[in-house]
Every structure is written in structure tokens, then in C-alpha cells.
Image (tube, grey):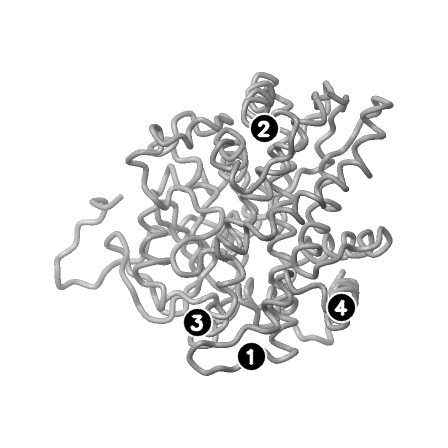
């Protein structure tokens, strides 16, 4: 709490309260096995900021929107993306935009930003919709005819990957390529959290899964390089993101990206766009089918706004409930459920000392479930994002895409994609829950749905 620490103005600030743990291991066992149940209990007992033992090191957990403001906006230069988690991510993304720092990051951001301006999203909307429809026809129509159980959590990776490939490279993946890339990406994402541990171990030391992780990266690289080469040889792909990135120049230096820089940015966009959309869409359908009245509201909104025609970019403001469904899924199960940073210099927050070199975790999962900002926070309620109910809410109480200058560059791309998917599925199918098959959250690198999201489909 802001007033929880009474100190003399000139006295050294204390560290945040420490959560008791085990010798040597600290709080790691409970973090691994109890995860957010443990963290929520710690927040209730120790307040919005507390110290955790992480084996030989320590970290500070931050659980209030004002902490996100401080770390990610006001003092962002003191809290770069350092530490073992980001070192693990860099083994895949190299120096791509999500992990780069300082002047280099600013240069790359300037070069990538035009690719995500509104006029670019308008230009990409047609390809996005075409790809969504192709995926619905290829994977959804058969189970809609037969009535067999259908796992949307397995279907969305195919759809979101092809949306990314089509918009980035101008052409889709062959089914075999998409399957290989999907399996490789699933393993890469799953391994990254374990990869944090690997950063402190010698590279020669055997670590279960590390060899497979490296092979998965080689698989993704090989597929992406094929797509890059295809883009070089096809002059008709000038409306793709790849073409824009290849020909973009830094306004200050006039330089273009090197082949290595282009690879890192393409991989970063591919990974971030694929995983965020896949996880968010799976959870959106889980909640919609668990509350059929919400499915009916979505269908009514889509029918009123579109009838039978396909949506366009201009229709997105007419689908506010669809956007709210996506935002609410991202609130309850944000793919990036914590935002790790590393303190460069000593700092102070809520009257507590933040020592230089300390790992900081802005816990978006807990921030998203605070009852002082979200009424009945465990309930899935898309209406909470209406203008009336959003008025006065702390601007950093919802941050699935991060916030501040490091907010995800593809935020509006992802939200547009989600609205289009919800609209097209609502127009073509009815999805109902299968009794007894309720998705459970898997706390890995992201918050995926363990054992899938199973529904029965019927054509409209």
C-alpha cells in the first residue's frame, strides 16, 4: 500500500516484505507448483509489492497498475528487458524488436512502425479475411457436418499461422509446411520458460529438451527463409509486410535492415503474432461456449452489422461486443501473464528500495484480476470494456500487450484479426460446449488451454 511504510525522510528505505521460503530454493517450489494461487495469497498477506526468493537470486513482484506505470512508462530506461527470461527469448529472436534495447531498438521501431499504421491494416484486411475463410472451409466444415467433437485450440494455430504468413509474405504455407511450423512453434514456446534455467548452465551440460529446442528453431528458420526467398522472386507481393520491411529505411540514417536484422524482426513478429492470437482465440471460444447467452449476443451483433456479407476494416467499430469478447479473454488469460524487467540502478517504489540488479516482475495476471478495478474479476464479462464501464479505470489495469513505449507493435493487428475470426465463425457456424470437457489453464511460457477447447459445430 502507498501508506504502508512509515520512514524518516532521510532514512534508508527498507526492502519490500519478503515472502518466507525454503533454504537455498526460496519460493521456487511454490512458484512452480502453485503459481498464481501462491502469488495471490502473497499479495493478500504482504501487499502489492513483495520480495521472492528465486534460488540463489531474488525478485520483486509488482501487483498494482501504478507499478506498471512506474516501471514501464515513467522509469522505463531503468528497467530494460534483462535477466534470464529475456536471455532465453533472445536465443530465438536474436535482436528483434521485442528484445532489443536502447538506440538500436528506437531505430528498429521507427522502421517497423509504418507497417502497422492504420492504412496498412486496411490494406491487409482483405488477405486476412481470405485466409480465415480458407481455414474455416478446410478444417471446420467437416466436423460441422458430422457433429464429431472439434478442438478449436488445435484449429486456431493453423488459422493464425496462415494469417501471419499471408499478410507478412504475401502467400500461404503448404499444409505440410504449416504442420511442421506449428509443431515447432508449440515446442519453442513451451520450452522458453525452462530455457530460463538453461541460461545459468554451461552450454555443454545436457538439459532435457534443449537439443529439440535448437532443432525447432532451425525448422522455423528454414521455413521462414524459404518464404523470404519466395518473396524476393515474386514481384507481385509488394503489398506484403515483408516487402515493406525490406524496403523501409531509417528516417535519420537512410539505412536499410541487414539480412540478419530482417530475420530477427520477421521471427519476432511471427512468434509474437502467432502465439498471442492462438491463445486468445482458444480462450474466447471456451468462454463463449460455456455461456451460450454470450454466443447469442455475438451472433445477433454480427447479423445486425453485416448480414451475410464478409466484414471489412470499416465494420470493426460496429462490432464492439466482438472486440470486448477478445479483450476479456486477454484479461483473464493474458498470453504475457508477467512482464519481467531488470533494475539497472537503485530505485524507490511505494516507500520501498529497489536495488540495482534485481529482477522485477509486473504481474499482469494479478493486475487483471484486482477487484478494485474489475468487478467480480473471475467472471467473463465482455461488457466491462464498454465506454461507460471503462470510464475512470486505471489505464494500466489492462496490459496484455504491455504498455508505454514498449507496447506490442502488433496490438491493433491482433485485435482486428480476433474480431474478424469471431465474426466469420458466428456467420458460418454454431458452436456449443461438450459437457464434461472444460478447458484447464496450462501455466507455461504462455497461458494455453491444457487438453484443448472442445466444441460441437453445426453449420448455420
- SS for callout 2: helix
Determine whether 152 is above or below 77 in the image.
above
> Which residue matches tag 1?
256
At which x and y percent is residue 109?
A: 47, 67
Mark 4 secondary-structure assignment: loop
Checking the image for residue 106, the label placed there is: 3
Front position among marks 2 and 1: 2
Q: Is residue 64 left or right of residue 126?
A: left
Question: Badge 1: how crowded within 10 Å, few (<14), some, or many (20+)?
Answer: some
| Residue holding disc 4 | 234
Q: Are marks 1 and 3 in contact (CB under 8 Å)?
A: no
Q: Earlier in the sequence, mark 4 or mark 2?
A: 4
- Whether residue 154 is visible here, answered yes or no, is no
Mark in front: 1 vs 4: 4
Sort mark 4 into few (<14), some (14-19) or many (20+) by Cα contacts within 10 Å. Answer: few
Q: Which residue is mark 2?
A: 306
Q: Are marks 2 and 1 in contact (CB under 8 Å)?
A: no
Residue 372 left/right relative to 259: left
* Quarter occupied by residue 13: bottom left
| Mark in front: 3 vs 2 | 2
- Image location (x, y in percent) of residue 41: 44, 37
Q: In this orientation, which residue lies closer to the viewer: 406 or 357? A: 406
Earlier residue among tags 3 and 2: 3
Amino acid at each position: 500500500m502507498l501508506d504502508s511504510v512509515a520512514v524518516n525522510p532521510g532514512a534508508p528505505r527498507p526492502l519490500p516484505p519478503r515472502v518466507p521460503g525454503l533454504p537455498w530454493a526460496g519460493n521456487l517450489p511454490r512458484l512452480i507448483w502453485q503459481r498464481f494461487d501462491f502469488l495471490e495469497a502473497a499479495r493478500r498477506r504482504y501487499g502489492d509489492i513483495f520480495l521472492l526468493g528465486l534460488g540463489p537470486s531474488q525478485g520483486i513482484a509488482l501487483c498494482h497498475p501504478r507499478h506498471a506505470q512506474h516501471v514501464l512508462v515513467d522509469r522505463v530506461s531503468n528497467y530494460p528487458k534483462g535477466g534470464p527470461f529475456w536471455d532465453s527469448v533472445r536465443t530465438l529472436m536474436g535482436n528483434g524488436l521485442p528484445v532489443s534495447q536502447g538506440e538500436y531498438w528506437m531505430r528498429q521501431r521507427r522502421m517497423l512502425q509504418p507497417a502497422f499504421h492504420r492504412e496498412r491494416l486496411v490494406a491487409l484486411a482483405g488477405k486476412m479475411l481470405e485466409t480465415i475463410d480458407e481455414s474455416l472451409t478446410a478444417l471446420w466444415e467437416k466436423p460441422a457436418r458430422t457433429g464429431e467433437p472439434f478442438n478449436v485450440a488445435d484449429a486456431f494455430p493453423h488459422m493464425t499461422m496462415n494469417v501471419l504468413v499471408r499478410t507478412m509474405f504475401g502467400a500461404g504455407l503448404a499444409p505440410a509446411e504449416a504442420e511442421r511450423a506449428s509443431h515447432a512453434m508449440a515446442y519453442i514456446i513451451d520450452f522458453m520458460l525452462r530455457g530460463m534455467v538453461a541460461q545459468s548452465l554451461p552450454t555443454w551440460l545436457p538439459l532435457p529438451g534443449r537439443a529439440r529446442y535448437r532443432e525447432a528453431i532451425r525448422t522455423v528458420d528454414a521455413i521462414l527463409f524459404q518464404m523470404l526467398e519466395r518473396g524476393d522472386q515474386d514481384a507481385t507481393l509488394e503489398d506484403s509486410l515483408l516487402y515493406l520491411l525490406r524496403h523501409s529505411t531509417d528516417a535519420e540514417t537512410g539505412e536499410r535492415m541487414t539480412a540478419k536484422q530482417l530475420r530477427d524482426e520477421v521471427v519476432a513478429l511471427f512468434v509474437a503474432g502467432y502465439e498471442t492470437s492462438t491463445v486468445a482465440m482458444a480462450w474466447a471460444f471456451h468462454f463463449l461456449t460455456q455461456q451460450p447467452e454470450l454466443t447469442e449476443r455475438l451472433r445477433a451483433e454480427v447479423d445486425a452489422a453485416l448480414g451475410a456479407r464478409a466484414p471489412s476494416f470499416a465494420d470493426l467499430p460496429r462490432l464492439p461486443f466482438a472486440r470486448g469478447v477478445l479483450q476479456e479473454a486477454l484479461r483473464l488469460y493474458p498470453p504475457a501473464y508477467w512482464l519481467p524487467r531488470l533494475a539497472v540502478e537503485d530505485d524507490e517504489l511505494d516507500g520501498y528500495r529497489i536495488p540495482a540488479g534485481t529482477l522485477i516482475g509486473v504481474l499482469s495476471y494479478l493486475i487483471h484480476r484486482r477487484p478494485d478495478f474489475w468487478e467480480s474479476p473471475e467472471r467473463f464479462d465482455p461488457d466491462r470494456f464498454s465506454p461507460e464501464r471503462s470510464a475512470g479505470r486505471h489505464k494500466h489495469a489492462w496490459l496484455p500487450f504491455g504498455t508505454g513505449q514498449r507496447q506490442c507493435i502488433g496490438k491493433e493487428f491482433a485485435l482486428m484479426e480476433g474480431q474478424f475470426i469471431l465474426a466469420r465463425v458466428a456467420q458460418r457456424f454454431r458452436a456449443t460446449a461438450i459437457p464434461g470437457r472444460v478447458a484447464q489453464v496450462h501455466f507455461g511460457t504462455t497461458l494455453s488451454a491444457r487438453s484443448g477447447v472442445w466444441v460441437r459445430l453445426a453449420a448455420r
